């Protein structure tokens, strides 16, 4: 296998982009990444997208987007794994460059979610759960994560306030990210007084509905210096795993087994452990998710995830800053783009380009992107080469 | 939901048809072709137990449109006697009286009204037993 570097990153603005089409949002991110990398050709492309069919009535995305990026003729494929689509697309691109099949690969992620009504978006997102045995019974995504939250609170004594601290922390980070959908700070009190969605989770525990795209360019590490003068960021670990899609089929309702396995594989490949990571972007689709994820990644002991948010351990300046971009919660969650945007944030942090939210001395970053209630998870480790 | 899919699911929804692995005894609901525990492909048809216990639950306040007339309503994960776990509404009980460990029984109810065609969909819900 060849060593692989990320040599270009790009993002569109994230938010409610009513005046822009899906293809335009994607092209904005892709051209930014191509410009950042300094490449003049693309050999192959992967697009992470969960549900353009339900959100905008368009399938066959890989060809459409290759055409509009101006590279029709290349190999292109769309990758779908619900909210992990972007992360799985990145892994596909990584494997293609590592294997030697292609040299320059563009990995993008996109979702255009605000062209449908709120109920339409809820319906599309619900297809990431087991439609026949979960959705049919009237449970929603917030409802599934709410059941994880109450399990975590009951078993580990996690408090409602601790869970709220995840949202407060991520908004504090996101307030420093000009591309974020909701770049402002919130308080614990505001979270606890916001509308109940599914007990005990409230609206400010939930990531928003977002339009947005992100893109990165991959190439062999040996060739990377030809294109860019920026610090080279090497992919040193890639792990992927699945779990039962239905939450009820798991032995433990608040442990992300797929995240544990994906992380173990990525750590092993990179030859590092949780304590070697400078910062991480993780899948905080709901506040409780970040708590369970940082436990599964080994950043804290089982049951300690709530305390980590409350104590500042996972804030900028803490032992292991988590979601410096603002996370899904503040930056937004265009589902297919999220996993790719995590790579963008880590790459910029490792290059030292993150401005006010820069983690000082960041050398090694981790991304964790998951689908549904954790039925799929991808973990990547990136390092300064 | 398309009618064909709905009819296909009736053996599970109406008759609680499950299968028990001949080798390791794991009960699969819905039935599977290969046991996720031991890999065996031989099963005996069994009916799911109707008794169970609430393992975790929530109250849905913001519901999908086909359930909005029922909100707020409780949904939980119930572990039935024999080990199968199902996601199900917990009904006929004040929302603030539901708790983890509560004993429940499976009953048949109307689940949702599907779209403007108004197809009534039936299935299982759980009610508390004292
Ligand atoms: Zn078996």
Image (cartoon, coloured by chain):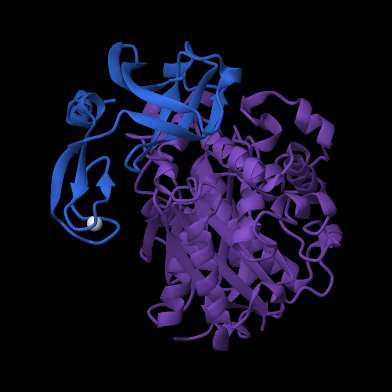
Chain colours: A purple, B blue
Q: With respect to residue A211, does A33 lie above or below? A: below
Residue drawn 55% across and 51% down?
Answer: A337
Locate residue A246 relative to residue A3 in the image: left or right. Answer: left
Using the rendered image of the protein, determine whether residue A229 is visible from the camera's viewpoint.
yes
Residue drawn 37% across and 54% down?
Answer: A63
In depth, the one of A263 and A70 nearer the eye is A263
Locate residue A194 relative to residue A3 in the image: left or right. Answer: right
Q: Which quadrant of the frame does ligand 1 lie within?
A: bottom left
> In the displayed image of the protein, which residue is found farthest to the front?
B130
Q: Quadrant of residue B18?
A: top left
Q: Which quadrant would the N terminus of chain B be assigned to in this image? A: top left
Q: Quadrant of residue B86?
A: top left
In depth, the one of B116 and A29 nearer the eye is B116
Rendered location of residue B4, percent (x, y): 18, 27
Residue drawn 39% across and 27% down?
Answer: A137
Using the rendered image of the protein, determine whether residue A69 is visible from the camera's viewpoint.
no
Residue drawn 76% across and 32% down?
Answer: A191
Q: How many marks?
A: 0
Rendered location of residue A220, percent (x, y): 52, 82
In depth, the one of A17 and A24 nearer the eye is A17
Q: With respect to residue A368, does B31 lie above or below? A: above
Rendered location of residue B72, percent (x, y): 55, 16
Q: Quadrant of residue A279?
A: bottom right
Q: With respect to residue B116, does A186 lie above or below? A: below
């Amino acid at each position: 296998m060849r060593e692989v570097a990320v040599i270009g990153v790009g993002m569109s603005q994230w938010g409610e982009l009513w005046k822009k089409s899906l293809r335009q949002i994607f092209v904005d991110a892709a051209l930014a990444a191509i410009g950042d990398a300094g490449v003049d050709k693309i050999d192959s492309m992967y697009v992470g997208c969960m549900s353009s069919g339900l959100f905008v009535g368009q399938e066959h995305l890989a060809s459409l987007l290759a055409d509009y990026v101006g590279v029709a003729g290349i190999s292109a494929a769309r990758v779908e794994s619900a909210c992990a689509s972007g992360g799985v697309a990145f892994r596909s691109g990584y494997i293609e460059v590592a294997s030697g099949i292609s040299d320059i690969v563009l990995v993008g992620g996109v979702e255009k979610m605000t062209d449908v009504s709120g109920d339409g978006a809820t319906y599309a997102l619900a297809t990431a759960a087991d439609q026949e045995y979960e959705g049919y019974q009237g449970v929603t995504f917030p409802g599934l994560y709410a059941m994880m939250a109450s399990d975590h609170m009951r078993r580990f004594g996690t408090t409602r306030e601790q869970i709220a601290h995840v949202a407060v922390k991520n908004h504090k980070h996101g307030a420093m990210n000009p591309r974020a959908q909701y770049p402002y700070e919130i308080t614990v009190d505001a979270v606890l007084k916001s509308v109940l969605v599914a007990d005990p989770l409230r609206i400010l525990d939930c990531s928003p509905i977002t339009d947005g795209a992100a893109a990165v360019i991959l190439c062999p590490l040996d060739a990377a210096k030809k294109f860019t003068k920026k610090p080279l960021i090497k992919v040193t670990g890639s792990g992927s795993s699945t779990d039962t899609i239905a939450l009820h089929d798991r032995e433990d309702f608040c442990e992300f087994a797929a995240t544990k396995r994906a992380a173990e594989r990525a750590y092993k490949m990179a030859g590092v452990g949780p304590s070697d990571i400078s910062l991480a972007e993780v899948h905080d689709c709901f506040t409780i998710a970040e708590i369970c994820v940082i436990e599964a990644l080994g950043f804290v002991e089982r049951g300690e995830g709530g305390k980590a948010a409350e104590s500042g351990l996972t804030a900028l300046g803490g032992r292991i800053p988590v979601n410096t971009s603002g996370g899904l919660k503040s930056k937004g969650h265009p589902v297919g783009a999220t996993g790719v945007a995590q790579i963008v944030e880590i790459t910029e942090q490792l290059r030292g380009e993150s401005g006010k939210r820069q983690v000082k001395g960041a050398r090694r970053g981790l991304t964790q992107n998951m689908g549904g209630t954790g039925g799929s998870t991808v973990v990547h480790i990136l390092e300064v080469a | 939901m398309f009618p064909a899919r709905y009819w296909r699911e009736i053996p599970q929804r109406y008759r609680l048809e499950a299968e028990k692995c001949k080798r390791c005894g794991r009960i699969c609901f819905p039935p599977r072709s290969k046991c996720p525990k031991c890999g065996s492909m031989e099963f005996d048809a069994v009916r799911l137990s109707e008794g169970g216990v609430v393992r975790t639950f929530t109250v849905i306040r913001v519901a999908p449109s086909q359930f909005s007339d029922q909100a707020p309503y409780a949904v939980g994960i119930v572990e039935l006697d024999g080990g199968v776990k199902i996601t199900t509404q917990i009904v006929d009980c004040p929302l603030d009286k539901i708790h983890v460990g509560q004993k429940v029984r499976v009953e048949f109810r109307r689940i949702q009204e599907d779209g403007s065609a108004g197809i009534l969909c039936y299935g299982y819900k759980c009610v508390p037993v004292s």
